[in-house]
Image (cartoon, helix red, strand yellow):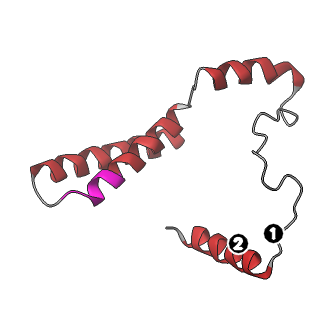
Amino acid sequence: MLLLDKLAETKIKAAVDKGELENLPGQGKPLELDDTSHIPAELRVAYRILKNTRYLPPELEHRNKIRSLELLLSGIGDGCEKTRLITRLSLLKASLRGASR
C-alpha cells in the first residue's frame, strides 16, 4: 500500500472512530455513479457509449494488467513461471512509461 493510501485510511478510521461520518446524506443508500453533470452536454452521449461498452483507455488497461501480474507474482514461488511473469511485468511497465511520454 502506498504512503498516501495509508494516510487516507488512517484519517478515515479516525473519523469513523470519532463518529464524524455518522448521519451523512445518503447514508445506507447506493452511490449515484451515473452523475454526468461535470461532463459538457455535447460529450455526455459519447461518454455514456464508452461507459456502456466498458471501454478503457490503453493506459488503464496496462495498469490493470500490471496490477493483476503483481498479485499473481505475490502468490507464486521461485521458478521459470515467476521469471517469465517478472519479464512480462517489466515490459508492461516500460510500455506504460513510454505511452505516458
- Position of 58 with respect to 93 (left or right) is right
- Position of 80 with respect to 9 (left or right) is left
Query: Which amino acid type is shown beneath numbered disc 2?
Result: Ile
Residue at image point 83% right, 74% down: 20
Residue at image point 59% right, 67% down: 5
Work out whether 10 lies above or below 24.
Answer: below
- Position of 42 with respect to 86 (left or right) is right
Q: Secondary structure at mark 1?
A: loop
Which residue of the protein is positioned furthest toward the left in this rendering? 80
| Labels 1 and 2 touching (C-beta < 8 A) | yes
For the residues carrying marks 1 and 2, which lies nearer the camera in this image? 1
Q: Which residues are magenta?
A: 70-76
Name the residue that disc number 1 marks: 21
**Magenta segment main secondary structure:** helix
Name the residue that disc number 2 marks: 12
Q: Secondary structure at mark 2?
A: helix
